[in-house]
Image (cartoon, rainbow, N blue to C red):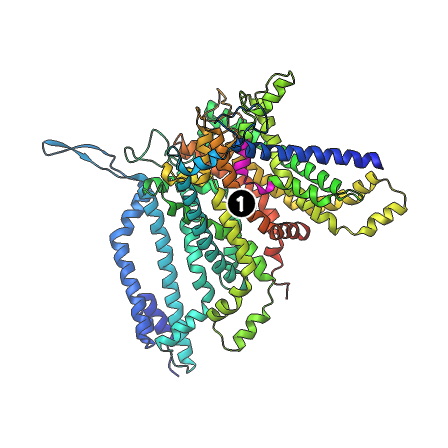
Amino acid sequence: MKTRHFITYIILALLTVSIVYPALWIVMSSLKEGNSLYSETLIPKKFTFDHYKELFTSTRYQYVQWYLNTIKVAVLSAILGTLMTLLGSYAMARFRFVGRKFGLTGMLVLNMFPSFMSLVAIYILMLQFNLLNSHWALILVYSSGAFISNVFVAKGFYDTIPKSLEEAARIDGASNWKVFTNVMIPLSKPMLTYVSLVIFNGAWIDFIFARLILRTEDKSTLAVGLYNIVNQQTSTDFTFFAAGAVLLAIPVLILFIWLQRFLVEGLTSGASKG
Amino acid sequence: MAKHTPQATLLSVLFMGLGQWYNRQFVKGLLFALIEIAGIYWIVTRLAKSVRGLITLGETPRGMVKIGKEFKMVEGDHSIFLMVEGLISLIFVLLLLFLYFICIRDARLTALNREKGIKPHSFGVSWSNMANRNFPYLILAIPITAAVLLTVMPIVFTVLVAFTDFAAPNLPPAKLVHWIGFDTFKNLVNLGSWSKTLIGVATWTVVWAILATLSTYMLGTIVAVLIQQKGIRLKTFWRTMLVIPFAVPNLVSLLVFRNLLNEEFGPINQYLELLGLGGIPWLNDPTWARITVVSVNLWLGFPLIMILVSGILTTIPKDLYEAAEVDGASRFFTFRVITLPLVLFSTAPILIMQFASNFNNFNVIFLLTNGNPVMPDYVYAGGTDLLVTWLYKLTLTNNQYNFASVLSILVFIFIASISILNFRKTRSFKEEDLIQ
């Protein structure tokens, strides 16, 4: 009995070390002196916050600008995307109308197109229409994509709200619009929080579309900017990258802790009910 | 009783709005008539030209043309603009036909009501009626328009590009693009270097998707079961620690790994050298790079499975285990006969979706290895490139748009056939009217 648990503990401890090590290493690297990747010890001999200061003062990289760009793109995408998901999924969940089944099937199929499918086209279209390097291009792509990818989550949520609530309001003479704004939107808060955070997170860390659309350094988002630092052949800014990466990860970590309950619930209910 | 239906319907067919006027709904009729006038104007002035553009993709290339005695630079047609314009026109035509249909139907229904003696509504009443009855369409209008313009149209466009010769060096505005049918598909199979790359990359993509899915699935399940065991202490601690990779944005983790595994300066090779072992070309040798991406993906991916399986484990009734214990079954036997089948049964759909998403796992490959190391006999692809990263490079760096489009189509067909079965079974799609 004892020995078997002993083995379990060893396995868990090894896994934990292998998971904590990279995280610890990047945090330590961001605090060490110099700028090279090479370091003699994991824990630096001398701690310094210079690289964090450099993020905000450096003239070589516009880190602050990237941060602001990322916030702008993520916040606006979250607002627009949530609005569209709210409108669209409510209609899909609550009304039976001509073309509904077709619409649902269509969206299922669209979900299966890898985003790469439209990637080629969006690149060509943006290139030809001179819309490359614009934040609005990104925001529109993210928020319209968000509707299609979240509509089933949101619809699943509405399916669990009893119809009697709306019927009561209708009997009292409320129009569809009134029912929607005064009854359904307040009830949708948990779903709206979830969807907006998912969109925010997606836009915050998206790399694929951002790199495709954003061309110049002053328009970059964090993801694109950090990738470019690492991808340079002659990069000697490793510690700068480390500090930047830590600051990029922190908002997502906070979101994750906030979202954890929703996420785990959503994932497990999907799994067990199939 | 007067007959109204044939007249109203026929008048509407003749010209939008006439039927409404016949029904004495003047404002509504005026609106429909205006739509038709605008529509006809547009059809006469623009439609033929844009349909022609879509069919020919342009006839005059850019170049010098002799006008009188001088040579002048002429802009020529821009094939891609013509294609997009043609597509938008087709969407417009569909919209017009839809409105035409609505108008006829409206005139007919109102006339039917008149025959029954119901007076046609005034404009204000029919407007508010429409807003209430068509509420779902009204609130769907914005999201659907956005989705059509930014998701559906690009996809249609991609499919169309697959049938053209739109690839460097044949790029507008300098050159015209032509329809070439299935030639790109054929070239991908017949041209030696392309087909070799396609087979190599596709095989690796499938192998990768299987390895990545199975490895994360196995480790995730094992860890969940280990933590769940009776008598293990600090359960919450282990779970919290092991869920870290799931919480850190994978962009960051992957770029960190890329540095950790740097062949010359990375700490991992540094430790190996301290131990007296040589450094390993983690990312620079094709075989090692493949091992590396699978291992790093394992690090990133197993927490998700762990969370899922932990959730399922708590739903397995305890008495099953107690009964097994009474019967004297060994722990391993209980695992094999009770735990494993139940977990497998519940996670099967997830396993399939994981396979599909690994098949398109752009981030892990692109951020970690960039698809490299370079393979000398591949066209624009490296040893760890998946179909999707190859496609990305073809578009962004090499301007081989038609090949990229063909690859998108192939990937789509593969993924869609896997997930269509899976998706159809999801609860949200099937049992929606069962609740309440």
Q: Residue furthest left?
A: B69
Q: Which sits in the foreground, B267 or A7?
A: B267
Label 1 packing within 10 angstroms: few (<14), some (14-19), many (20+): many
Magenta highlight on residue B340: no
Give residue B366's position: percent from left, percent from top.
50, 32
Side (left or right) of A148 relative to A133: right
| Most frequent secondary structure within the magenta stretch | helix
Side (left or right) of A220 relative to B235: left
Q: Which residues are magenta?
A: B246-256
User: Based on the displayed image, in which of its 4 quarters is residue A236 positioned?
Assistant: top left
Q: Residue furthest front?
A: A46
User: Based on the displayed image, in which of its 4 quarters is residue B83 positioned?
Assistant: top left
Q: Which sits in the foreground, B240 or B427?
A: B240
Q: Residue furthest right?
A: B327
Residue A157, visible in the rendered structure? yes
Q: Which sits in the foreground, B345 or B294?
A: B294
In this rendering, the count of numbered labels is 1
Q: Which residue is mark 1?
A: A252
Give residue A138's position: percent from left, percent from top.
41, 45
Side (left or right) of A143 relative to B8: right
Residue B207, visible in the rendered structure? no
Magenta highlight on residue B252: yes
Give residue B163's position: percent from left, percent from top.
40, 37
User: The residue under label 1 is which amino acid type?
Assistant: Val
Q: Secondary structure at mark 1?
A: helix
